[in-house]
Image: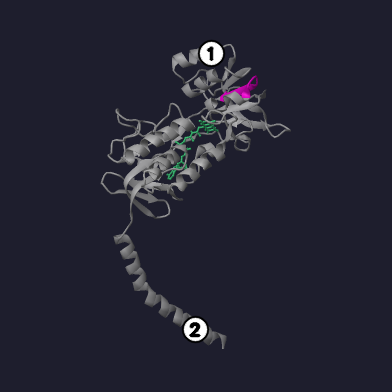
Amino acid sequence: MPIIYLGCWQKSRNACLNFLAPANVLRIYFEKAEKHMEEVIIIGSGCAGMGAAIYCARAGMSPLVLEGSQPGGLLTTTSDVENFPGFPEAVNGFDLVWRMREQAQKFGARIETAIIEKSDLSAPEKKLYSNDGREFCASKVIIATGSSPRMTGVPGEAELYGGKGVSACATCDGAFYRDKDVVVIGGGDTACEEAVFLTRFCKSVKIIHRRNEFRASKIMAERALSNPKIEAVWDSVAEEILKGDDGFCRGVKVKNVKTQAVSEIPCKGVFIAIGHVPNTAAFKGELEMDSEGYIKHLPDSLVKTNIENVYVAGDCSDKVFRQAITASAMGCMAGILASS
Ligand SMILES: Cc1cc2nc3c(=O)[nH]c(=O)nc-3n(C[C@H](O)[C@H](O)[C@H](O)COP(=O)(O)OP(=O)(O)OC[C@H]3O[C@@H](n4cnc5c(N)ncnc54)[C@H](O)[C@@H]3O)c2cc1C
């Protein structure tokens, strides 16, 4: 009879579970008691994390890299990288960082997916807690979690981002817009700096800003406004980034917030310059940070934090250069110090 059969099965299953339960409890207990202490954990798998991993791995530390939600980091979101030394013919951003990863793994780096949301760094045994309930322990920690560019979220932006006309980095992508008309969105120091930088290559640069004066420092604002290639589009916000028939950016739809008039600015490139957010929430209260959340380093070293054996590398600390080579170099420094 099927009902009796089901009943028997449930009984034996319950008996099994009862039998296994104490064993499970013991297993968890022993696992906790014997929690593996890593020599070094690197948080982040971008250029900084991989730079650190290569140096720690070659020093025989078998580093554990926790790669977060963006394996390979920000560079994977761009196509051609023309300024990383050693690649005169340019290199694809994804390929570049993936080669760093293979290089680190070749020397013994281990890579695991984990998003760290909390940390306890003051004791000699550093603890890291991931968002799925895991706990990691290490004697040394290298934080290389990068920063995320703030985006406007308007239609077209995400679709055209990363090689199709929308960028968040003029230093990186400006040279691709030689003799083209471009737009910068923003009004702070970064927007003005990026606009001035873009005039080296571009035919014209329009800065779209929601107010009728820049938030930037006076000197930066003056530098931008006195440049004959730069024009400010005041009191305006971008409503949409427009795609051409070729699949690339053809312009921006803007709305004047005072008159509500909508118009189109034709352009080939749009640079979003409304700031970056450092990915450092997991370390708040543990490490010294500046008012924007960038992790501070000690005066005598670019990568030592205020806690011994906790190092920082790349864009989560550096808000000035924000380049693949500077992030990799900071990773190198952190790796050397952690392994010495
Ligand atoms: C559109 C664009 C184009 C660019 N082009 C160039 C270029 O041509 N040349 C150049 O030199 N630079 C370029 N850059 C800049 C370059 O990408 C960055 O400077 C570089 O990636 C910074 O490296 P990073 O390792 O510090 O951070 P990221 O590359 O941002 O890596 C951060 C890593 O940390 C991980 N992470 C974050 N939070 C957590 C967490 N809580 N737990 C675990 N892991 C976490 C992420 O998953 C990621 O793996 C460009 C940037 C952009 C946005």
Return the residue at label 2: 7
* Amino acid type assigned to the residue bearing label 2 in the image: Gly
Left or right? Give the position of 143 relative to 262: left
Quadrant in the rendering for residue 35? bottom left
Left or right? Give the position of 267 relative to 94: right
**Which region shows up in magenta?**
177-184
Image quadrant containing the C terminus = top left
Image quadrant containing the N terminus = bottom right
Image position, residue 72 (x, y; %): 50, 42
Residue 180 counted in the magenta span: yes
Left or right? Give the position of 327 relative to 120: right
| Residue 281 in sight in this render | yes
Image position, residue 86 (x, y; %): 53, 31
* Amino acid type assigned to the residue bearing label 1 in the image: Leu
Return the residue at label 1: 225
Front-most of residues 79 and 188: 79
Q: Are marks 1 and 2 in contact (CB under 8 Å)?
A: no
Image position, residue 91 (x, y; %): 58, 34
Circle count: 2
User: Label 1 CB, ligand 1: below 8 Å?
Assistant: no
Taking the view exactly as shown, the residue that stands out farthest to the right is 245
| Within-10-Å neighbours for mark 2: few <14, some 14–19, many 20+ | few
Taking the view exactly as shown, the residue that stands out farthest to the bottom is 1
Q: Looking at the image, is 137 positioned above or below residue 270?
A: below
User: Disc 1 or 2, which lies upstream in sequence?
Assistant: 2
